[in-house]
Image (tube, coloured by chain):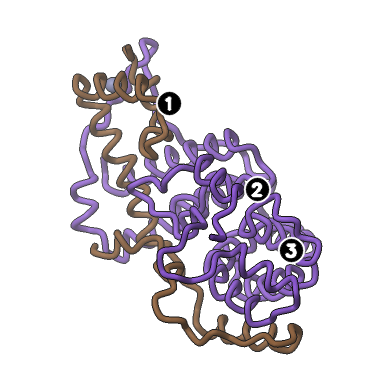
Chain colours: A purple, B brown
Amino acid sequence: MGWSRLDRRRVLLYGPPPLDQPHPMMPEAPRTDGEPTDRELVELSQKGDGAAFARLVERHQRQLYRLALRMTGSEADANEVLQEAFLNAWQKLPAFRGESQFSSWLYRIAANSALMRLRRKRRAPDGLPDQPLELQAPKFSSEGLLDPPPYSDWSQRADEKMMSSQLGVAIEKAVQELPEDYRTVFLLKDVDGLSNEDIATSLDLTVPAVKSRLHRARLALREKLGDFFGA
Amino acid sequence: MIEHCKECVDLLGDYVEGQLPPEQEKALETHLSMCMPCITFVRTYKATRRLCRTALAKEMPSELMGALSSFLGKHVPGFSCPKSKQGQPEAVAPDSELKKG
Ligand SMILES: [Zn+2]
């Protein structure tokens, strides 16, 4: 019931969430908690049921907030993006045909709203010229060996130090220093747990482009954390 | 067969997400079983994700949820905030497994 062909296709497409990164929203159905599926709530909302729409909002607001926050970089903007996006969704809902998952459709709306807001605001960014694409990356010898090899395995120490505020500051700084395109993808994926597909939809990228930015961002951050740990 | 660390590093993105085709995954693990620098590399690559997640995870503040509800309440007829339904699965932060530090 309420477990449509589309939903099923989505599960096939995305597979189960990777073990190390539970995705909070996917796959959509079937729900084991007896709650209605998104699709059912969408159908009710399309008939004007505001309470059903409220449940959709309740269900998706957190993840949409993360998207808006990462894209705009400000809590106040994220708040406005969210209001605009959900209102927009409510107004456009009668035209929603369900070819895509409701959540992807919603991401797209919120991402557009965030982009418009950014465009309106984008003054000459304070002294930062177009970011040079100098991402740090590991180095290899001509034979393709890691050169220099990583001397120390700081992953162990990292766990002891996990909560140190110095480390927190170092991470904030390292992530801030990433070029924006890389930073947004990295935050959405590795911090917020969106799927590559949802990120691609939201940012209008291909999935391979998402993966490539993600990997390069991780490599650059890994180098910087290595510096922090003196590795 | 993976001979070079570079190939190994290139595949890590998919590897840590469990998205490598089985043959490639096997080849990579074979390389890992013989190459200490790559083992260290993989561990620190994974730790990078873990640390960033712990340091940077953000939850939607409850005031914002309230503001959103009252905003939508003004524009959507019949909009009623389902006062935190018990056990909404989406309420689980994606970093829950990392909360221990
Ligand atoms: Zn190697």
Amino acid type of the residue that numbered disc 2 sits on in the rendered structure = Thr
Label 1 sits on a secondary structure element that is helix
Q: Are marks 3 and 1 on the same chain?
A: no
Residue A201 - label: 2
Give the Cα separation between the discs numbered 1 and 2: 24 Å
Looking at the image, is mark 3 or mark 2 nearer the viewer?
2
Label 2 sits on a secondary structure element that is helix
Image quadrant holding the N terminus of chain B, namely top left
Q: Which residue sits at x=73%, y=73%?
A: A84
Looking at the image, is mark 3 or mark 1 nearer the viewer?
3
Q: Label 2 near label 1: C-beta < 8 Å?
A: no
Question: In this figure, which residue is indicated by the disc labeled 1?
Answer: B10
Rate crowding at label 1 as few (under 14), some (14 to 19) or many (20 or more) other CA atoms within 10 Å: few
Position of residue B9 relative to residue A165, above or below, is above
Nearer to the camera, A86 or A131: A86
Q: Which residue sits at x=65%, y=48%?
A: A201
Position of residue A3 relative to residue B1, above or below, is below
Q: Are marks 1 and 2 on the same chain?
A: no
Q: Earlier in the sequence, mark 3 or mark 2?
A: 3
